[in-house]
Each structure stands twice: as C-alpha cells, then as structure tokens.
Amino acid sequence: MLVVETIAKVRRLFFRDRKGIKEISRDLNLSRNTVRKIIRSDQTEHLYTRTTQPFPQLGTFLSRLDDLLTENFERDKRQRVTVRHIYEILVSEGYSGGYDSVQRYAMKWRRDHGFQNSKVFIPLSFKPGEAYQFDWSYEDVILGGVVQKVKVAHFRLCHSRKFFVVAYPRESMEMLFDAHNRAFKFFGGTCNRGIYDNMATAVKRVLRGKEREFNKRFLQMCSHYLVEPVACTPAAGWEKGQVERQVSDIRKTFFRPRPCFADFDELNEWLVDRCRALAAKRKHPEDKNRTIDEVFVEEQASLVPINTPFSGYSEHECRVSSTSLVRYDRNHYSVACHAAGKGVTIRATATTITVFYEGEVVADHQRRFGRDKTIYNPWHYLDALQRKPGALRNGAPFQDWQLPRSLRLIQKRMMQHLGGDRSFVEILCAANRYGLDAADAACRKALSQGTTQSEVILNLIAREKEPAVPATISTPKKLVLHEEPTADCARYDRLRKGGESCSATN
C-alpha cells in the first residue's frame, strides 16, 4: 500500500516540478503504472478496503457460531458471555482456528444485526439554583496507620459546577442525611431539584418510567430542605453525568496516592479545604473566562436558603439484653439497667447513638465503628451496683472507669476493708445525685483531714449542696411590732381558773 509521503512526492514532482512519468518512476523506484495511478486519481491517500472477508478456518463452524451469537444476545445483558467464552466453546467442539477470526466474525455479525448502534446524548443546560447531582464512591485511604475503604458522598451544583465531598465509614441512611446537612451548609443553600440514582437509602421501589416510591425518611429530608427528588433511569448514569465525571476526577486528584490521616474528622477537614482550593483555581467548563467559584457567587443568590439542619437520624427497635446492652451496627452499647429486658428505640446519627425507653433517654453514646466492640457507660450500672456492690471489683463496665483522682484514692483505701465496696457505692450514688464535682471536692477535703469514712464524705457532699443561710433576715415593714409584748405568767393561771376570757386583750 502506498504511503501518504510517497504520494505527496509523486504529486510534487509531476505538478510542481513538471517532471515526466518515466523520470519520476526511475527516481522513486516506482512502476510507471503506479505513478500514472497517483496522478490520475487526484487523491492524497490510497486506501484498500476488503470487500469480502474469508473465514477459511471457521468453515463448517460458521452456522454453530451464528447459533451461539444469537443465543447470547437473546439473554439478559447481565447474563451475556464474552466472545472469548464463545471461542472456547468452539475449541471444545473441535475448532482449530484462532481467536481473531471468531472476533472479526462476531463484530460483523453484531453490525449486521444492529447490535452496534451508537448512543446519542443531548447536552444538558441548567439554570442557577435549578438542580444538584449526588452520588457515592468507594476510595482507599490510610486512617490511623491502617488502609481502609471509605465511602465518599459527592455533591455537584449543575449550573456553577461547585462541588463538595465528605467521607464516611458506611453508606447508611444516617450518613446520607449528615452528608446533605454538611453539603447545604457548605453551599449556603440548596437547589430546587436533587438528582439521584436508585440507591436503597433513597428509593424504596422502582416503578414504571420515572415513577419511584421513595423512602419515608428520605422524603422527610427533602421536604425539610424544599427539594424535589428525581431518580435516574436504572443503569443510565449519563442522566447525572456531571457527578459521574466528578467521581473519576476526585479519585485521581484527591485519593491518588492514598491520603493518610489520623481519623475521619481530619480527613473531612482536608477534603473541604481541597474542594475550596480547587474550585477557586479551576476554570468553568462552559465559561472559560471565569473560575467555578466566580460562577458560584452568582448562583448562590438563587439557592434556596436553609434555616436549621435536618435531624438526620434513623430509628430501630430492639430489646435490651440481660447485661443491659443493645446491639447496633455490629457493636454493643450499654443502657441504664432499669431498661434491661425491655423494648427500646435506638436513634442513630452519623456520630451518636441515643437509646429511648418510654420517651426517656436511657443511653447516649458516641458512635463507634468496626465490629464486636462493647461501649460501656459505668453510670448505667449504678442501680445494679447497689444490689451487687461486689461487682465493682471485676465488673467489665468498671475496669477503665475514668473517675477523679480523689475518688480513686478513696476507692483503693475502702476496698482494703470489709464492706468497703458497699460504702464506695454509696459515695457513687451521691456523686450521681449531686454531681461528680461535688463528690470530688468532698473526697479531697476528707483526704486532707485524714479520713476515708463514707459517713464523713456523704456529710461533706450534703453540706456542700445545702442552701446557704443568709447572714441577716430582712422583715417586711408590715410585720414589724410597734409595741413589744411583755411576759405575764400570772395570765396563764387566770386562764386555767377561767378568770379571764380567751378574747382578753393585753
């Protein structure tokens, strides 16, 4: 096949330098017929197109290959196999040719049967404050020296392309709510519509067309922020193409190489700073003369203002165990022991676990992640300690109890004597009633006096909390006596004898 450079040389020698065909053929070592073909065709490139493609090796396997291809494309998309798999089936049946022949025939077969129609996408345009797009991604980071796979929530305003990302250990509903609270606070408002995929935390059931049955709590969040949720067509990621491209871009920009931080708080602070810095210097994809931040300043006036964040929690019903523990997200949390064996409601947010029993808060913990961890609050077991004070020595909730130093010294000295555990439990009950600071002050005062008697400490705590007696008592003017009464013992004798009426005056 003639290359473009050879054709260019022939054309220049003939049309510009006026050389003959014989001379050109001799100088370029080409046949005269080739030179004539180049000159007469008036084309700068000669391409060879094969009109027919022989498949000598396939031979009698062509009909079998047709059947396999037809059967494959009649299956559901998720069940279809690759051409390599079809090739291996033919080999097992005696085919001795190469894979390339099968691949070329499969491409021709798909083209002839209309399976290679290219998809056409229409560019979208959004007004300021009209819509935002949301998506999750999975990224690798190093937290506390351990490589972890985290879930990253992505937000993108469709008009200005302003973006926000935040990382979580889970992709649960309470994380979704917390991500929206953070994002809308970052943007200073929200849009009229939110575009999502059909994630389980938002969409309960996919109906016909664009109809969706949304999760109740997700709808409550959208109602709180005055957002109309819109779910994409299943497996149609191009309907939120901006945030889909953002996922790929943020992965390359923020998470390669793996960032290293102490915990999620430090990671998310870094992500916010990177979002601000990148938006300040990156050009808007449509308005090349302005940055994303400059366009966002204009869009911000069109955002729906927010007053208060949404109470982003999820509720779950469960029963408290006999050890006064509830299980949530593969970890155990202690609750007040009077709720043991009862049904309670767990209210979980991205950072806290709160347990309710008959409308009363019986536990409030910082949420922990991981597996098979038990989070104790020793004060939850105080009622049980009054009945079983001996558990203070080896009870699991009390092993790492962070009490003030004075209380620990009192406990150490009391436990050396018989019945000391019960006495110390009485001090703990007083501390729970009057406050740990009052108990600490009383214990320090008792130690300074050289005593560890529980009666003395309890007395000091009670005296610390008694209302102070005023130095002077002021008497209202109406109650002040203008004439001081005089003592008269003989009057009592006269009353006994009936010589003076009860109504007598002084």
Image (cartoon, rainbow, N blue to C red):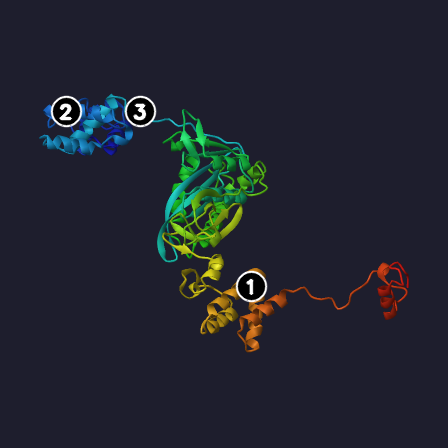
Report the disc number at residue 117. Answer: 3
Going from N to C along the chain, the mark reached first, 1 or 2, is: 2
* Camera-nearest residue between 231 and 291: 231
* Camera-nearest residue between 492 and 289: 492
* Camera-nearest residue between 185 and 285: 185
Q: Quadrant of residue 498?
A: bottom right
Extreme bottom residue here? Answer: 450
Which label lies toward us, 3 or 2? 2
Which residue in the protein does label 2 denote?
64
Q: For the residue labelled by badge 1, is the local secondary structure a helix, a strand or a loop?
A: helix
Report the disc number at residue 430. Answer: 1
Q: Specify the quadrant that holds the N terminus.
A: top left
Residue type pointed to by label 1: Ala
Residue type pointed to by label 2: Arg
What's the residue at 25%, 34% (across, down)? 5
Q: For the residue labelled by badge 2, is the local secondary structure a helix, a strand or a loop?
A: helix
Disc 3 and disc 2: Cα gap in Å?
25 Å
In the rendered structure, the answer to whether residue 465 lies left or right of residue 454 reads right
In the rendered structure, the answer to whether residue 482 lies left or right of residue 242 reads right
Residue 166 visible in the shown view: yes
Q: Quadrant of residue 72?
A: top left
Q: For the residue labelled by badge 3, is the local secondary structure a helix, a strand or a loop?
A: loop
